[in-house]
Image (tube, grey):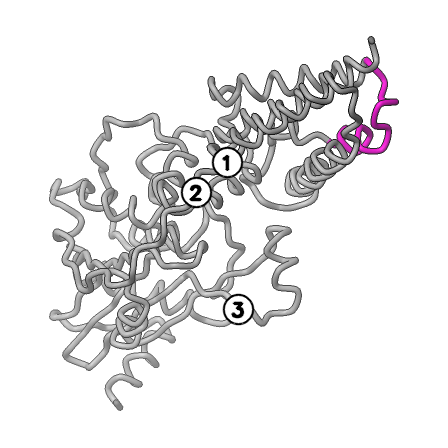
């Protein structure tokens, strides 16, 4: 214990001297049950058995109890921090959650290892440990990536060229929500804007912990062209029960579209007035538009602007909900053109990929606006 404390004391004064038996590794953790943990996690391990030191540095720490937590998160002003724990405690936590853990030992020199240790301990100081979290550009994985790059002594990394260079940030998010988080995917697609459709470089792929693990396997150091890491070793197997497969929101909204279409046809035939249905549909759509506008114009999130979901989730629906059959014809036509544009974007993802569920949602709105327009011109 005295050796352990002494090692930390030296590191905190930037005089770390790890033994020749020390090593560093990247830890990659599998997805958890909560949405924020569904993309996995990354951390760095520094181990020196000679002095009894085995630490994990975790850049993914946040405090639910901080003042105004949810408002800070919504506005993109939530600070994450670097935490430090012993390796056994870290492993126990992920074992308890039933999550897989892999380790990739870094093939770096002893000087570079000491550089990394000093950088991490410096980052752990109270004045440096907090940072402004950004899901795509500055998170638990990108911080690990950057620390590894910064510790190299006059060397750089040479990534292998990936054949699938058309993946966007959104495509990589989709990989983590493929079967069991389809409703979360819809919510994410509504909230995130055009910047998520940026085509990623090898370096940018590493915002995702699991993608970074795959990328590290292809990395070589510039001087020797030797691999940066040893092959990944699985420390823990996944034991948590798989999440239940969710009902497809696209399928559900197609069913709702046909129900609304049937009601609209009956309305035309029987001269019903479905004002209550329009109030619900238009009101919900307006609430979504408020979310889109808030995330676009009033937050510091990089990835929520610009957002072409505004084409279907339009603030004009507040006007339609209030005016009902008194809505002006040209405003109805304008919104119908916007809905047609949104439908096209679900098929041809330019300039932004819209979720497949937006097609039936837009058709529902189009159908009801067409009913209003028919009433106006009849």
17 lies left or right of 285: left
Circle 2 sits in a helix, a strand or a loop, which is it?
Answer: loop
Label ID, residue 252: 1
Categorize mark 3 by other alpha carbons within 10 Å: few (<14), some (14-19), many (20+). few
Q: Looking at the picture, how far across and down is residue 158, in whole percent?
A: 22, 38
Instruction: Say whether marks 1 and 2 touch (CB < 8 Å).
Output: yes
271 lies left or right of 358: right
Q: Looking at the picture, how far across and down is residue 211, in whole percent?
A: 29, 44
Q: Looking at the picture, how far across and down is residue 122, in whole percent?
A: 40, 67
Measure the alpha-carbon separation of dots 1 and 2.
Answer: 8 Å
Q: Which residues are magenta?
A: 315-329
Instruction: Say whether marks 3 and 1 touch (CB < 8 Å).
Output: no
Q: Residue at x 63, y 27 (%)?
A: 260
Circle 3 sits in a helix, a strand or a loop, which is it?
Answer: loop
Q: Looking at the image, which residue sits at the far front?
A: 270
According to the image, label 2 marks what residue? 247
Q: Quadrant of the C terminus?
A: top right
According to the image, label 3 marks what residue? 63
Query: 2 or 98: nearer the eye?
Result: 98
């Amino acid at each position: 214990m005295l050796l352990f404390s002494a090692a930390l004391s030296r590191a905190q004064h930037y005089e770390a001297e790890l033994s020749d038996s020390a090593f560093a590794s990247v830890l990659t953790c599998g997805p958890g049950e909560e949405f924020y943990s569904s993309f996995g996690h990354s951390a760095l391990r520094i181990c020196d058995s000679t002095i009894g030191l085995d630490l994990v540095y975790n850049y993914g720490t946040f405090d639910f109890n901080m003042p105004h937590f949810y408002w800070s998160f919504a506005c993109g002003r939530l600070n994450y921090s670097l935490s430090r724990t012993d390796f056994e405690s870290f492993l126990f936590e992920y074992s308890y959650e039933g999550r897989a853990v892999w380790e990739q030992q870094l093939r770096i020199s002893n000087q570079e290892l000491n550089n990394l240790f000093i950088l991490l301990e410096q980052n752990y100081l109270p004045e440096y440990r907090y940072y402004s979290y950004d899901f795509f550009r500055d998170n638990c994985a990108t911080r690990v990536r950057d620390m590894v790059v910064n510790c190299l002594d006059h060397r750089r990394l040479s990534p292998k060229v990936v054949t699938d260079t058309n993946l966007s940030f959104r495509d990589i998010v989709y990989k983590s929500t493929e079967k069991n988080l389809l409703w979360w995917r819809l919510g994410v697609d509504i909230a995130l804007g055009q910047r998520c459709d940026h085509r990623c470089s090898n370096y940018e792929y590493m915002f995702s912990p699991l993608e970074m693990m795959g990328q590290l396997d292809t990395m070589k150091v510039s001087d020797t062209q030797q691999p940066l890491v040893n092959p990944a070793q699985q420390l823990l197997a996944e034991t948590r029960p798989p999440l239940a497969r969710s009902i497809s929101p696209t399928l559900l909204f197609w069913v709702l579209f046909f129900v609304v279409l049937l009601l609209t046809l009956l309305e035309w035939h029987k001269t019903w007035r479905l004002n209550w249905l329009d109030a619900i549909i238009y009101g919900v759509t307006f609430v979504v538009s408020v979310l889109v506008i808030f995330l676009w114009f009033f937050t510091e999130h990089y990835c929520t602007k610009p957002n072409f979901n505004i084409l279907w989730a339009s603030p004009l629906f507040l006007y339609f909900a209030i005016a009902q059959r008194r809505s002006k014809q040209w405003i109805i036509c304008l919104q119908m053109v916007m809905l047609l544009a949104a439908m096209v974007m679900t098929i041809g993802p330019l300039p932004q990929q819209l979720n497949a569920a937006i097609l039936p949602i837009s058709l529902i709105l189009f159908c009801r606006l067409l009913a209003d327009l028919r009433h106006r011109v009849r």
